[in-house]
Image (spheres, helix red, strand yellow):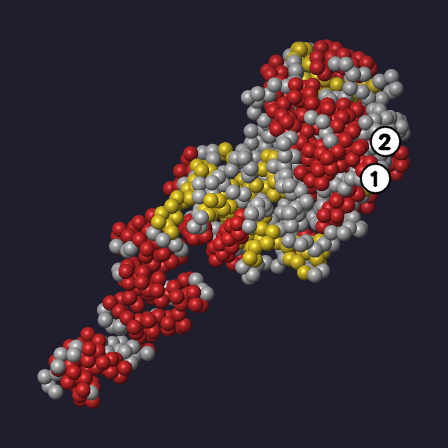
Amino acid sequence: MKLTKEDVIYVADLARLEIDENEVDKYVEQLGKILEYEDQLNQIDTTDVLPTAHVLPVKNVLREDVPVPSLDREKALMNAPSQDKGCFKVPKVIE
Amino acid sequence: MEYEIVIGLEIHSELDTKTKIFCGCSTAFGAEENTQTCPVCLGLPGVLPVLNKKVVEYAVKAGIATNCNIARFSKMDRKNYFYPDLPKAYQISQFDLPICENGSVEIDVDGEKKTIGITRIHIEEDAGKLNHDSTGTYADNNRCGVPLIEIVTEPDMRSAKEARAFAEKIKSILEYTEVSDCKMQEGSLRFDVNLSVRKFGDPLGTRTEMKNLNSFRALERAVEYEAKRQIFEIEQGNKIIQQTRKWDDDKTESYSLRSKEEAHDYRYFPDPDLVPVVLTEEYISNIERHLPKLPWVRKAEYMEKWNLSDYDAEILVASKEIATFFEKTVDVCNDAKSAANWLMGDISATMNEKGISIEEAGFSPEDLGELVNLINKNTISTSIGKQVLKEMFDSGKKPSVIVQEKNLAQMSDAGELKGMVLEVMKANPQSVEDLRSGKEKAIGFLVGQIMRQTKGKANPQMVNELIKECMNEI
Amino acid sequence: MDKINTIHEINALIDAGEITYEDVAMKYLDRIEDVEGKVDSFLKIMKEEALEQAKAADAATDEKPHSELFGIPYGLKDNICSEGVETTCASKILKGFIPPYDATVSSKLKAAGAIVLGKTNMDEFAMGSSNENSSVKSTKNPWDLSRVPGGSSGGSAACVAADEVVFSLGSDTGGSIRQPASFCGVVGMKPTYGLVSRYGLVAFASSLDQIGPITKDVTDCAIVLNHIAGHDEKDSTSVRKEKEDYTSYLDTNIKGLKIGIAKEYFAEGLNPDVEKSLQEAIEVYKSLGAEIVEVDLPNSKYALSAYYIISSAEASSNLARYDGIRYGYRAEEYDDLMDLYKKTRSQGFGDEVKRRIMLGTYALSSGYYDAYYKKALQVRTLIKRDFDEAFKNCDVLLSPTCPTTAFKLGEKSDDPLEMYLSDIYTVPVNIAGIPAISVPCGFDSNGLPIGMQLTGEAFGEKHILKAAYAYEQATDHHRKKAKL
């Protein structure tokens, strides 16, 4: 699969990265090279091989439904670049 | 009608747990902004989610109650998208292995029964709340991580009425199983509608989605509006565009949300921070055994045990609170028909008028049972009973106390009543003559006079008999 | 004072009453004063707090018996949270972020009484093999300041090698502890996935990340592991397991221990000096009575491909939260929300991080998931099976940690793929979730340290610690120090 300019622009948009025209070419080249290397994966026959999402057979890790104290609002908001009215502030979103 | 409307629903219901799905923050509604958050639900760097045990239990309950297959193996996935109400920029949900699948629920519309297929039920986390004003958008993350189940139906509904009936049925199921409090005004139960229209016999048309309908009325009206809109478009020769629309219940119209700059590409993948949920037969059957009685079980009991009509029983079981209230009332008065009539009639009307629930009515099932008993023992008449009920709503006093305080007991003293009867007959000779000449109607007028004088307290049966008795004495 | 070197040596001196905790802290702080300007190990040095703690440790000496880490100065990688201490992952996008919580390992080390001297430099978000991807500065290799210390835990390895701390904590996603340990001539271990809690470790690739110790010798490694291992309710992937005393496996008698050699790990591209050192190490093991067996790891050549897909895909999701809303950097000028996202992220992340986010997003995007992500998870199954098979015939696997010794600053920074190849021997271990340790095993013709990797089966830390210890006791590579 050959990586195209359109692919790079689409992916950058999905990932919320702003890239200019020069960078698009750079990404096409660099990612293209990496993906070429990745193409060796296609040489491997993985028919009937189950994917491993977790290396350890851990299951059913569950927490009791018991409340614990929340953060003070001041602490919750202390790292915010912009806050007001007890909330995280962002530019107005039009829904 | 030339067109068939095809409707599928996605219902989001907040689960009635004490804590959030992946952290110990409270889920209580109405707290001040950002006071129920922690590093986990704020998505701070490095923190990890741990699944709430009750969330699994509640989802399984909902699945069993809707006849779903419960997955022996399910897992959590990440749904990736950016939005200011989603701190991690991904929602933890379930993609290809939901916890429940392939269920069904029976609905009843105007006496016709129909089975609606349930595709799946999965568990996921709620997003935060955005408040907007002219200066910007403000993110309150209290709701981030509140546990949800999403119930997805097959496109099996064909009218607004059916959609509403299904939604009401789901609400009652979730209430009965105590999976959700279903407080719609708090957003605990929200509907998304997928709707398309087609000429009968045609393949499915292009569908649109309407999001976040928060009441049954909005659901019904949105379906009607959208169906009309689509039919109109088609009649005009236009194509239906697949899109997400938002319903404005105040304006009773929907509008297209600006189409996003990108297609939805959520890049689902298994959440590496969470491990699979593996359920045993034993776990599932244990939940099944302890499941509270479901509405249709109760309905069948009402019809069989108490001879209630299908219609009455259906109305009573629609709400768990009403059904429970009803059952307790019958325990006291042993008169299911009367208890049902009161609940479906005056009580329901007053509740609607006041906008309150049965729990807020101010009286207990024992009180209503006592009221029925007072009527059945002829202590008061049915019409006095209505007065007493009103007083019960207003003061919360027991019916017997109200009857005593307001001196509302029926006059059944023959001696006292006879004097009044004679006086009235003397004062209305024309009516007496009419009665004598066989005009039976005249008796009604005379009884009415007595009832007016006694402010309704006279026992009408007895008055009737006394009039006949006195005909000879006049 | 020259005996102040390892945790166990310091404890012996303290117990003998020869030195105080304040002496120890001062020694390391003075050393930092002397060499930090050359090495650049730290992003933040906590001198005042550390001295205060050391004084308090001296004052508290008479109470109950202390843990072995009591009063011991250490370095904490800047992707591990410590409450109230700026944690940036060496990224502009997290500048100023103060976590209101401790990582589980931080609170464990606090409870043990260890003293943090500073937050160590790293490749941004642990993505890199040279520390050149730090947004702040490049750490230098104490053995040759013109060379890289390796990465991503380059600061953590360099500060131990430069005697700026007694030990440090790093994180290892594809070799990020072992490769810099190898380059800097110190001991570094990646424990079994699930042995050490990841809570509070800023995630790079959640299914691969693991915190581990970087130390002067194998004994210290076992001591630190004792304190950081264990189940944590806050981490769903942490394993419930009976507690072990890892120091109890430190035994020089390894007669009959089966050491597996995979020919795949001695393939072309391996530096001849590195190969020679490894052959010598094999001879040492033979002389100690270990049995050498040949094993096959046929799918390990695909590990790097699978690794870059899995780690980048997970990273693309894990790093989506850096959006300029709740913490960290926000672009100064933007038009609307979309612009805020894009400018913040484009300005906040460095090139390598953006490249991996792009790669990972692509691998998960509609139409490519099966070809890349799912395929990589299937290959992971095959790699894991290879190791399972290999460990039926041996107790530990012996291999080089890296194909080369430390390379020059700037040498590989223009070619991402070339840089990735540095991790070719370390990556399969993370893919399979098993433990491995890198120990010094010699020097190349330039006098640069060479590392040997010993790999064990899942929760087989005892085997690799034992094998590493026996080798270390029979040699003295670990005693050599960088001249600064």
Position of B149 relative to C359 (above/below): below
Labelled disc at residue C136: 1
Q: Pick the residue in front: B161 or C155.
A: B161
Image coordinates for residue C46, horizontal then vertical, percent: 80, 43
Q: Amino acid at mark 2?
A: Lys
* Crowd band around label 2 with a 10 angstrom C-alpha radius: few (<14), some (14–19), many (20+): many
- Label 1 SS: loop
Extreme residue toward the left, this view:
B472
Position of B29 relative to B126 (above/below): below
Image coordinates for residue B281, horizontal then vertical, percent: 42, 34
Q: Is residue B41 visible?
A: yes
Using the image, name the chain to which the residue with label 2 belongs.
C
Q: Which image quarter: residue B433? A: bottom left
Q: Pick the residue in front: B45 or C190.
A: B45
Labelled disc at residue C23: none
Q: Are marks 1 and 2 in contact (CB under 8 Å)?
A: no
Name the residue at 83% across, 29% down.
Answer: C413
Using the image, name the chain to which the residue with label 1 belongs.
C
Q: Which residue is the site of mark 2?
A: C140
- Label 2 SS: loop
Position of C48 relative to A22 (above/below): below
- Image depth: mark 1 or mark 2 in front: 1
Q: Amino acid at mark 1?
A: Val
Extreme residue toward the bottom, this view:
B427
